[in-house]
Image: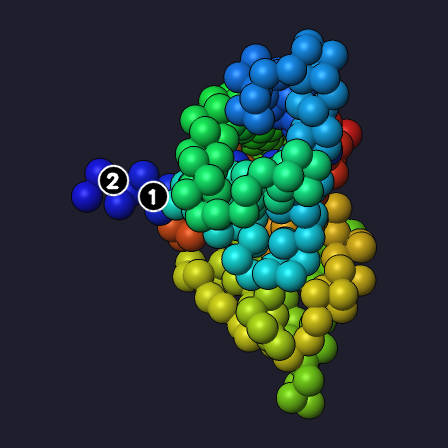
């Protein structure tokens, strides 16, 4: 049960792999230079071979980080990236790189083309590379976790400030007029913006989750997120936090963070709303400007 929980737990997917590829490539070059599995030559030749092998490794990593997500976007969705997917993806990348470098040695050094030699080479490569790759992934993971925790703390501080401000008497804000959303089924839906909790995309529909008359309600509309974004331009508190979510920041009561994202919590329901990395900067800017 513990192993299954770990495998299904959220994992970090590199946001800017071009920063990690040079680092891991340098470590791979160093390891290959010291171990020289192709045989012993003078140090200059060994360095040149290791450097060329590093270029092959960098090309394999580049294809892994940039090409595969375009070919298989659902598998590489950051929202559903888990430890199990990370392990499988890393093993596939290592095997691909090892096979590519072996093919490079076959062409350059005329190494024999045979399965035993290939298996031996892959085995040696898998002994060398996991350490630098794991170190690079853990380093990036810790940086991402720190960023999300800082964002969660900053948002929680702002939430506490707003809670204290709400206890003070305020004048009525006439600018918060009801919003009318179009529905492709020849009907419209009108709701007050301060009652909206969040809005999420569900296929060809948009689900508006709102709190009204002491109850949490939902309204499914046949429209696009682009239409919702246009409607939300006049509502400073309702912002886009994910490609599939808009959230009312005034309704958020707590924020937590993990290696993937920040999660926004509400008092009215248990469901959380994610803040993706691409919208994190905008959320932070809005929080700071609202002070």
x then y, percent, for residue 156 = 54, 28
Residue where numbered disc 1 is placed: 7
Q: Is residue 174 visible?
A: no
Give the farthest residue toward the top.
43
Residue where numbered disc 2 is placed: 3
Contact flag, marks 1 and 2 (Cβ < 8 Å): yes
Secondary structure under badge 2?
Answer: helix
In which quadrant of the rendered image does the N terminus lie? top left
Tell me if mark 2 has few (under 14), some (14-19) or many (20+) residues whose alpha carbon lies within 10 angstroms of its own: few
In percent of the image, x 48 and y 35: which residue is there? 121
In percent of the image, x 76 and y 68: which residue is there? 227
Q: Toward which corner of the image does residue 143 lie, by quadrant?
A: top right
Q: Nearer the viewer, residue 76 or 35?
A: 35
Q: Nearer the viewer, residue 59 or 164?
A: 59
In percent of the image, x 65 and y 71: which residue is there? 190
Rendered view: 43 above or below 5: above
Rendered view: 288 above or below 120: above
Q: Toward which corner of the image does residue 27 lie, by quadrant?
A: top right
Rendered image coloring scheme? rainbow
x then y, percent, for residue 6 = 32, 39
């Amino acid at each position: 049960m513990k192993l299954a929980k770990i495998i299904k737990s959220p994992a970090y997917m590199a946001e800017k792999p071009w920063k990690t590829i040079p680092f891991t490539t340098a470590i791979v070059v160093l390891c290959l230079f010291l171990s020289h599995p192709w045989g012993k030559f003078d140090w200059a030749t060994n360095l040149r071979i290791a450097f060329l092998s590093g270029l092959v490794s960098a090309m394999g990593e580049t294809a892994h980080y940039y090409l595969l997500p375009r070919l298989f976007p659902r598998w590489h969705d950051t929202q559903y990236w888990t430890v199990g997917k990370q392990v499988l993806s890393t093993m596939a990348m290592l095997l691909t790189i090892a096979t590519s470098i072996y093919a490079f040695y076959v062409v350059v050094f005329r190494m024999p083309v045979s399965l035993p030699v290939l298996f031996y080479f892959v085995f040696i490569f898998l002994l060398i590379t996991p350490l630098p790759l794991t170190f690079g992934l853990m380093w990036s993971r810790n940086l991402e976790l720190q960023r999300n925790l800082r964002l969660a703390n900053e948002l929680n501080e702002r939430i506490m400030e707003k809670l204290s401000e709400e206890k003070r008497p305020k004048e009525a804000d006439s600018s918060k007029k009801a919003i009318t959303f179009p529905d492709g089924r020849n009907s419209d839906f009108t709701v007050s913006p301060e009652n909206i909790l969040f809005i999420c995309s569900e296929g060809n529909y948009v689900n508006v989750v709102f709190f009204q008359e002491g109850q949490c309600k939902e309204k499914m509309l046949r429209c696009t997120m682009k239409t919702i974004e246009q409607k939300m331009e006049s509502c400073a508190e309702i912002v886009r936090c994910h490609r599939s979510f808009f959230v009312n920041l005034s309704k958020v009561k707590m924020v937590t963070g993990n290696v993937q994202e920040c999660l926004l919590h509400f008092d009215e329901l248990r469901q959380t709303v994610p803040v993706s990395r691409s919208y994190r900067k905008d959320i932070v800017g809005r929080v700071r400007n609202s002070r």
